[in-house]
Image (cartoon, coloured by chain):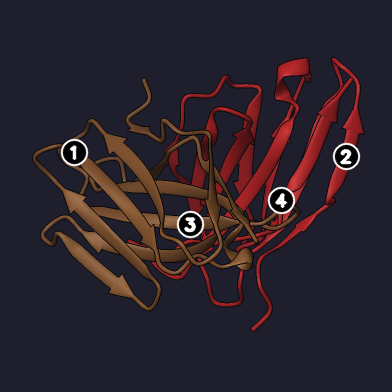
Amino acid sequence: DQQVKQNSPSLSVQEGRISILNCDYTNSMFDYFLWYKKYPAEGPTFLISISSIKDKNEDGRFTVFLNKSAKHLSLHIVPSQPGDSAVYFCAASDPGAQKLVFGQGTRLTINP
Amino acid sequence: KAGVTQTPRYLIKTRGQQVTLSCSPISGHRSVSWYQQTPGQGLQFLFEYFSETQRNKGNFPGRFSGRQFSNSRSEMNVSTLELGDSALYLCASSPGAVSYNEQFFGPGTRLTVL
């Protein structure tokens, strides 16, 4: 039972344009959502997060939007840069189970 | 501060063998979590240790086990390896008792089962 889903395995975007990565979840008890970025041969690194009581959080070029009624969150990267090419994982914090639940990941490729 | 380290980085085993992977958390971190990453499945939670006690466990068979030492270093063991166990095994450390939102990952151990 995949509680956190990233339905797009890959995304290709031109440099300078906006990248939008999407994530859907099923558990309404999740209280915190995070995005991690992963380069090959490295572990995931934390990128940005949002509490379930908010609908937007911004950090430089990265903005995360949360739509609780739709159980959907998205990560916007503007403008996209070649260094943003990586696999992005969406994760949700389950306070009852005290663990993070991850999505399958989306491979983002930024083309020059 | 040094980051999370995992050894070995790469490992090749054959079916039926057993394997032990090691993780050293960031200094001062007391929680260590283990994940399995496979294509199409993302990161699947294996277990979490805090102060030498397993605090949480994912939906993996009993062939997967772990432990944590008094210095917070952790090991995970997989017995009777199967082809499907081929994956990247990631370890993450967190500072305190309720810290599953602050996980710092190591580079992973790539396990190949032949």
Q: Secondary structure at mark 2?
A: strand
In the picture shown, does residue B63 fall above or below A20? Answer: above
Tag 4 residue: B108
- Mark 3 or mark 4: which is in front? 3
For label 3, the SS is strand
Q: Amino acid at mark 2?
A: Leu
* Image position, residue B26 (x, y; %): 61, 72
Which image quarter holds the N terminus of chain A?
Answer: top left
Q: Which image quarter is the C terminus of chain A in? A: bottom right
* C-alpha distance separating marks 3 and 2: 25 Å
Mark 4 burial class by Cα count in 10 Å: few <14, some 14-19, many 20+: many
Residues marked 2 and 1, same chain:
no
Share a chain, discs 3 and 2? no
Marking on residue A34: none
* Mark closer to the observer (2, 1): 1
In the rendered image of the structure, the colour used to display chain A is: brown
Using the image, tell me which numbered label, if any, was put on residue B11: 2
